[in-house]
């Protein structure tokens, strides 16, 4: 009888661990999904061509998202650089 109780107490602890993981993981995943941030960085030598594009589109949320685009470029002499970043809320 003691062995049977030990098995069920172990299973109960594992079930609680799984539930806690689902709740915490779901909360973190939701926070990451709501806070959409993009960071891009490029470094090049002379006569390089660099281009960066970043788009954040929200078509599900009615509230304003915490979004951000951070783009950095550094290049030597004679280089061409361009950066484009957009944040759109397309809730219909």
Image (tube, rainbow, N blue to C red):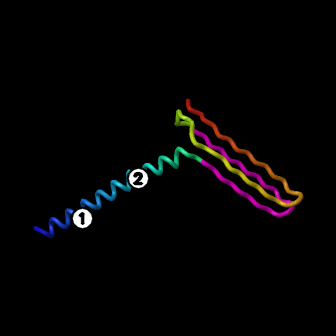
Picture quarter with the C terminus: top right
In the picture of the structure, the residue carrying the numbered disc 1 is: 10
- Work out whether mark 1 precedes mark 2 in sequence or the reverse, and give the earlier one: 1
* Residue at horizontal 56 percent and vertical 32 percent from the top: 91
Dominant SS type (magenta): strand
Residue at screen point 73% across, 54% down = 72
Image position, residue 43 (x, y; %): 76, 61
Q: Is 61 displayed left or right of 85 in the figure?
A: left
Horizontally, residue 54 falls left or right of residue 73, namely left
Across and down, in percent, residue 55 comes to 65, 44
Extreme-top residue of the structure: 92
Q: Secondary structure at mark 1?
A: helix
Quarter of the figure that contains the N terminus: bottom left
Count numbered badges in the picture: 2
Q: Nearer the viewer, residue 53 or 72?
A: 72
Instruction: Determine the residue located farthest toward the right in the rendered image.
Output: 78
Magenta residues span 37-58
Above or below: residue 46 compared with residue 88? below
Q: CA distance from mark 1 to mark 2?
A: 21 Å
Mark 2 highlights which residue? 24
Mark 2: secondary structure? helix
Q: Is residue 73 left or right of residue 28?
A: right
> In this view, which residue lies farthest toward the bottom?
3
Give the crowd class for mark 1: few <14, some 14-19, many >=20 residues within 10 Å. Answer: few
- Please provide percent x and percent y for residue 48: 83, 59
Residue drawn at point x = 85 percent, y = 61 percent: 76
Q: Are marks 1 and 2 in contact (CB under 8 Å)?
A: no
Rendering coords of residue 45 (x, y %): 82, 64
Let me know if residue 48 is in the magenta part: yes
Q: Which mark is residue 43?
A: none
Magenta-colored stretch includes residue 39: yes
């Amino acid at each position: 009888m003691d062995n049977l109780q030990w098995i069920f107490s172990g299973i109960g602890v594992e079930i609680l661990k799984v539930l806690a993981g689902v709740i915490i993981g779901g909360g973190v995943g939701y926070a990451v999904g709501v806070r959409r941030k993009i960071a891009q960085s490029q470094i090049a030598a002379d006569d390089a061509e660099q281009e960066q594009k970043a788009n954040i589109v929200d078509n599900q949320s009615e509230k304003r998202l915490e979004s951000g685009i951070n783009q950095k470029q550094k290049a030597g002499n004679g280089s061409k650089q361009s950066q484009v970043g957009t944040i759109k809320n397309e809730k219909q």
